[in-house]
Each structure stands twice: as structure tokens, then as C-alpha cells.
Image (cartoon, helix red, strand yellow):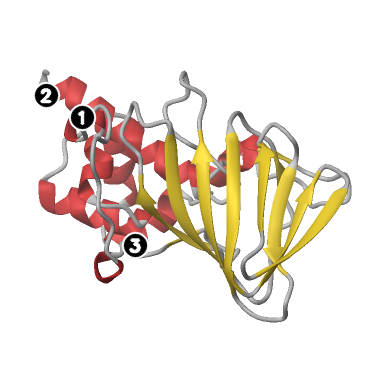
Amino acid sequence: MQAKAIAERIGTEIRRARTARAMTLAALAGRAGLSEAFLSRVERGEASSSVANLVKIAAGLGLGLQDLLGESAKPERTVLAVHRGSEADRDSELESTGYRWHRIVGGAPRDRIAVFHLVFPKRNRMRVMVSHPGQEHCYVLSGEIAFFVGGETHHLRAGDSIFIASEQPHRAEAAGGGEAHVLMTVAKPEHEPEALDWWRMPISGACRRPDQSKPRTKEEIS
């Protein structure tokens, strides 16, 4: 692959990951210790970045370097993966909400499922209903969760779980007065590039209730 094509692919991946976190270009530049102008050129594929700078950018996004290098750095389909608790990835955080997550397994282009560990903060600061293709199963590891699906609310405690078709508007929050941990399995449609859910979706992919604040403009997240 030509250098320009590689730079464009990496830039596209950086922008996709940044907007999925509702993070401004300036915020990411600050986290990575790079200039906003340089990072903008990298996202547009107009500038190549050293491996050292890519590591900084990946860290600013809460990703590993291989996540930015795209599908060419990943196997087409996971054949065997062993997850050990001592080797858990650093949690990523959805900026301004306090929600944290890390992917345990899955993520190759042809994987149909991915498994995540989600951490719901004691004080919830996100009231966004979302819908997207696929299915998901949530198992509560600790704490209590209020899971909203359409017009219904399901109260879940440790050991409880819920399985839904993700096209239904849904969201979840801690409900027991403390932090809550959830094991989530997401099944994506075959044509989708990756499994998506509310904690990683761009604001534009969310379905807001009428009483919620005005969605951010493109200028605010680009």
C-alpha cells in the first residue's frame, strides 16, 4: 500500500475514534502533546506521523497502537483468544460522562461478537437513548443497573441480565447509589465494520428524548 493511502487510512481511523468519544481536536491534541494543526493534517491524511506520535495519539484516545493501524494489523477473524485479568486493557472513558469500558475479546473485521467490561459511575451524567443494528446481552457483575428499553425500565442487580435487539431505543445507568460493573456481549450484523453501542457512539448516532439538551453541532465535535 502506498504511503499516502496508509496515511489517509490512519487519519480516518483517528478521526473516527475521536468523534466516537465526542472529543474535540484540541482536546486530543492536548492529551497527545501535539499541535492541533499537525493533528488536523494527520486526520486528513495530509501528513505522516511517526510511530512515537501514533503511540501518543492512541494513548490520548484510550486505544492501543494496533487499533489505529486498522484492519491490516488485525487477523480477519479471531480463531482463539485467551483473556487474563492481569492483562486487562486500560479503561477508556467517555469524556464528560464518567462511563468507562474496555474490550475483553473480539474486534477483528470478521468477528460477529465482541465482549466488553463496562463501568457505570455513581453519578450518571448521560441521558441519551440510542438505537443501532445488532443484539446485545448485559450481565450485571456488581452493583445495580436501571436499563431503559423503549418506554420500559428494567431494574437489574448482580447476577441479573438482559438481552435485547439493539434497534430498540435503549440506555442504562447505575441505580444502587454506587458504581456498577457490567459484562456486555454485542453481536453485530455481518455488514457492519464493528460492534457499536451507546458508550462509544458519536452524538449524531443517538436518539435524544425531547426534554434533553440540544445535540452538539458538527463544529463542536470536529
Q: Which residue is mark 1?
A: 7
Q: Is residue 207 above or below residue 110?
A: below
On the image, the x and y values in percent for residue 155 come to: 78, 63
Among the 4 quarters of the image, the one containing residue 70: top left
Q: Is residue 35 above or below residue 106?
A: below
Q: Amino acid at mark 1?
A: Ala
Q: Which residue is mark 3?
A: 31
User: Which residue sits at x=42%, y=31%?
Assistant: 112
Distance, label 1 to label 3, CA atoms, is 21 Å
22 lies left or right of 30: right
User: Which residue sits at x=12%, y=18%?
Assistant: 1
Q: Which residue is mark 2?
A: 3
User: Which residue sits at x=31%, y=68%?
Assistant: 85
On the image, the x and y values in percent for residue 95 come to: 52, 60
User: Which residue sits at x=68%, y=40%?
Assistant: 164
Q: Amino acid at mark 2?
A: Ala
Distance, label 3 to label 2, CA atoms, is 26 Å
Marks 3 and 2, the one that precedes in the sequence: 2
Q: Amino acid at mark 3?
A: Arg
